Image (cartoon, helix red, strand yellow):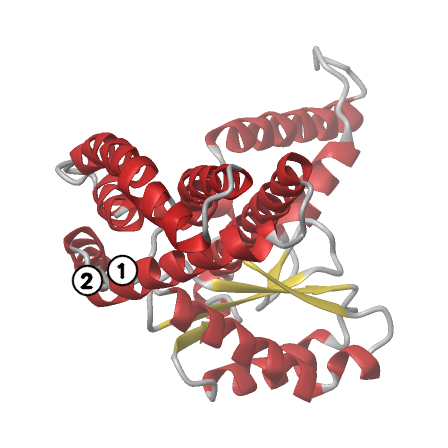
Amino acid sequence: PQDLPLIKEFNEVVSKTGGSGPLVVVLEGLSQDKAPLAITQLSERFKKVDGTQYVDSQLPKDFLNNKQLLMLSRRELTQLEQLVNQGIQYARDQLTGISLGKELFNPEKLQKLSEDYQFFGEISPFHKGKRQSNYYIFVKPKGTVTDTAFTKHFVDDIQKAIDESGLESEIPNLKIKLTGSLVVRLEENKFIKRDLEKSALLASFLVVALILMYTRSWFSVPLIIFPLLLSMTYTFALTRLAIGHLNIISGFLVAILMGLGIDYGIHLYIRFKQELLKGMSISEASETVVTQVGRSGVIAMLTTISVFSILSFSDFIGFSEFGKIATIGIV
């Protein structure tokens, strides 16, 4: 939730440090001759997408020319120095006819290092991967990765721009994919929602199955389940009014409250059925259930509430909201 103090502080830090990570557009299988047109066309489309701060598709070519050595690590610089010294010594040996070098000169290593960093060639202006056919475009959003609604809308718009370009159908073997922290966050949210749905469906199935196994009556299912569903509807309606949202932890309360709340319905139904079998009328059986089972149910409710309400005082927002919603649900 964007209104939480921690999220507000995080967003403030992010705004001062330049925002969260960019959305990375990966172009796989793009030939070198097609790269300039494809990357330029996509970059122009991405700039028009709502929420785009800037698009980084090219390296500062003029600055990097003749400065390729700055891109090497210390180990690679040491290796290059040794290879150059071996090459100089090898040339001297060839000229004088006297071999003084302790190690054999391997020109292939020097050639490979030269090709990797383009020492003697013109540097490529685009972001290329280790695979020569892979290119990257970095799209910086104005929003933050914590704003799930913005992130989803932004990623969908970028994907729409890619689809509308038609480059994947025009250029053979080209595949355009999205990655980065924004995509990872959306995938995490999708997995969490899927787990919540699975847990709720599994809990519902098990509850219905256990009721049928014990009572052996289809009539008992709606009689027990309907009050439970009604109470859970009230619970999350009040949650919407009082708190305004569910978090990752409190989202699992659907399954938890279903398991805890079904106990009251089962006890009431079984006692009601027992009183009817004794020959009582419906009104008499209902009165007995309310006065006897209802009283013990209230005591059980209070003990459960006392446990969950303690979580409401937790400094961690996730546990605190979990305790508040659980308390409302049990009541």
- Determine if residue 192 is in view: yes
Q: Quadrant of the N terminus?
A: bottom left
Q: Is residue 26 left or right of residue 140?
A: right
- Residue reaching furthest right? 172
Depth check, front residue: 266 or 175: 266
Q: Is residue 271 left or right of residue 316?
A: right
Residue 294 percent location from the top left of the image: 30, 41
User: Quadrant of the rendered structure where residue 214 is?
Assistant: top right
Neighbour tally class for label 1: few under 14, some 14-19, many 20 plus, Cα within 10 Å? some
Residue depicted at x 18% and y 37% = 309
Residue depicted at x 75% and y 22% = 93
Depth check, front residue: 43 or 15: 15
Residue depicted at x 24% and y 38% = 298
Question: What number is the disc on residue 242?
Answer: 2
Q: Is residue 135 left or right of residue 1?
A: right
- Residue reaching furthest front? 279
Residue 274 percent location from the top left of the image: 51, 37
| Amino acid on which the number 1 mark rests in the picture | Thr
Residue 84 percent location from the top left of the image: 62, 32
Count all numbered tags in the image, as a single digit. 2
Question: What number is the disc on residue 239?
Answer: 1
Depth check, front residue: 222 or 322: 222
Give yes or no for contact between labels 1 and 2 (Cβ–Cβ under 8 Å).
yes
| Amino acid on which the number 2 mark rests in the picture | Ala
- Determine if residue 184 is in view: no
Residue depicted at x 44% and y 37% = 267
Question: What number is the disc on residue 164?
Answer: none
Query: Please, what secondary structure does the residue beneath circle 2 have?
Result: helix
User: Quadrant of the rendered structure where residue 143 is?
Assistant: bottom left
- Alpha carbon distance from label 1 to label 2: 5 Å
Residue 324 percent location from the top left of the image: 22, 47
